[in-house]
């Protein structure tokens, strides 16, 4: 079994061709701009949408653990929750939903194989995303092995924040690695997103030494974090040093902002506007001068 929070069909990003993206639960980083914060926990995550709530309080009556109360506003005690999902099942308007469920490997394979003709005709395939897929390492390995038996192209989106041994075991089954490089300053990485920068860059250097052609560096461009020439040019320079020839610059967007409120977390970039692609086009020439293809967006 593996914990999944979404399966997106007919995706045309995060890898070549038409793809199915499988989003796995669990992440060991906590990026304050992240569009899917419901992915962080391995457990199902209760999401409350105030806009849909009619304050009928059926959820309060349905919860035998008294994890939910309604005193002027919706209150949820995660420590009392046993994830029975009775609250969301009782909700008339889908104001309450749980993100995440366990699926068998066979169930996932059967589902994605329904679209194999689309993959074959477009040179597409499967993208494993998250969260961080390597958080569920053993289950993830079973999944990618089962998918590879079906002769599917497999891409993975990864932060690199895990032991090198995990990467070595997974690599034979992966055709493309979309590897996040958010910053080169170790202290800034630790302070803002967490994780172990040494692990991250050791894994990237290993990939560069063994299969640079399989790697695309992906950099989310975030206001006040890395949206400056020095930082972005240094990431391009690193790719040049490592002989990695493809970088995606992903402009900051606010599409996941509402999700933060739905899981009762503060969104710290509340007042920031979406970053226009035009502002990043100047890096295309900087990359071209070094033999690196810079793509704006995924």
Image: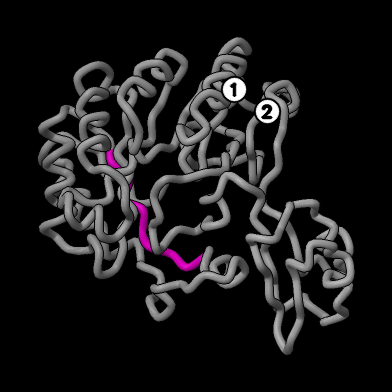
Q: CA distance from mark 2 to mark 1?
A: 9 Å
Confirm whether the magenta stretch covers residue 142: no
Q: Where is residue 264, by image quadrant? A: bottom right
Q: Which mark is residue 143?
A: 1
Q: Which mark is residue 225?
A: none
Using the rendered image of the protein, determine whether residue 8 is visible from the camera's viewpoint.
Answer: no
Residue found at x 65% / y 44%: 6
Using the rendered image of the protein, determine whether residue 127 is visible from the camera's viewpoint.
Answer: yes
Horizontal and vertical percent position of residue 202: 21, 30
Q: For numbered disc 1, what is the local secondary structure?
A: helix
Q: Does 120 appear above or below 263?
A: above
Q: Which mark is residue 1?
A: 2
Q: Nearer the viewer, residue 6 or 136?
A: 136
Horizontal and vertical percent position of residue 267: 46, 72
Q: Is residue 180 left or right of residue 91?
A: left
The span picked out in magenta is 247-255
Q: Is residue 11 left or right of residue 216?
A: right
Foreground disc of the pair 2, 1: 2
Residue found at x 36% / y 67%: 275
Horizontal and vertical percent position of residue 290: 11, 38
């Amino acid at each position: 079994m593996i914990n999944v929070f979404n399966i997106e069909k007919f995706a045309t990003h995060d890898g070549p061709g038409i793809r199915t993206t499988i989003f796995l639960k669990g992440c060991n980083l906590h990026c304050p701009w992240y569009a899917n914060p419901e992915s962080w926990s391995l457990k199902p995550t209760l999401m409350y949408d105030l806009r849909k709530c009619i304050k009928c309080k059926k959820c309060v009556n349905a919860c035998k653990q008294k994890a939910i109360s309604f005193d002027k506003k919706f209150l949820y005690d995660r420590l009392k929750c046993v994830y029975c999902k009775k609250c969301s099942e009782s909700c008339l308007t889908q104001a309450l939903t749980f993100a995440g469920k366990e699926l068998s490997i066979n169930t996932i394979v059967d589902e994605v194989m329904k679209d194999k003709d689309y993959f074959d005709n477009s040179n597409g395939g499967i993208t494993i995303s998250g969260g961080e897929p390597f958080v569920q390492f053993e289950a993830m390995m079973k999944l990618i092995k089962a998918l590879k038996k079906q002769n599917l192209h497999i891409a993975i989106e990864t932060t690199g924040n895990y032991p090198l041994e995990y990467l070595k075991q997974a690599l034979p089954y992966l055709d493309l690695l979309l590897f996040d490089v958010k910053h080169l300053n170790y202290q800034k990485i630790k302070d803002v997103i967490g994780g172990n920068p040494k692990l991250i860059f050791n894994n990237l250097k290993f990939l560069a030494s063994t299969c640079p052609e399989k790697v695309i560096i992906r950099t989310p461009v975030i206001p006040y974090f890395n949206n400056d020439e020095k930082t972005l040019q240094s990431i391009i320079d690193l790719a040049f040093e490592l002989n990695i020839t493809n970088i995606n610059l992903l402009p900051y967007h606010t599409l996941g902002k509402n999700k933060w409120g739905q899981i009762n977390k503060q969104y710290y970039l509340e007042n920031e506007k979406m970053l226009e692609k035009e502002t990043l086009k100047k890096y295309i020439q900087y990359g071209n001068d070094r033999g690196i293809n810079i793509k704006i967006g995924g």
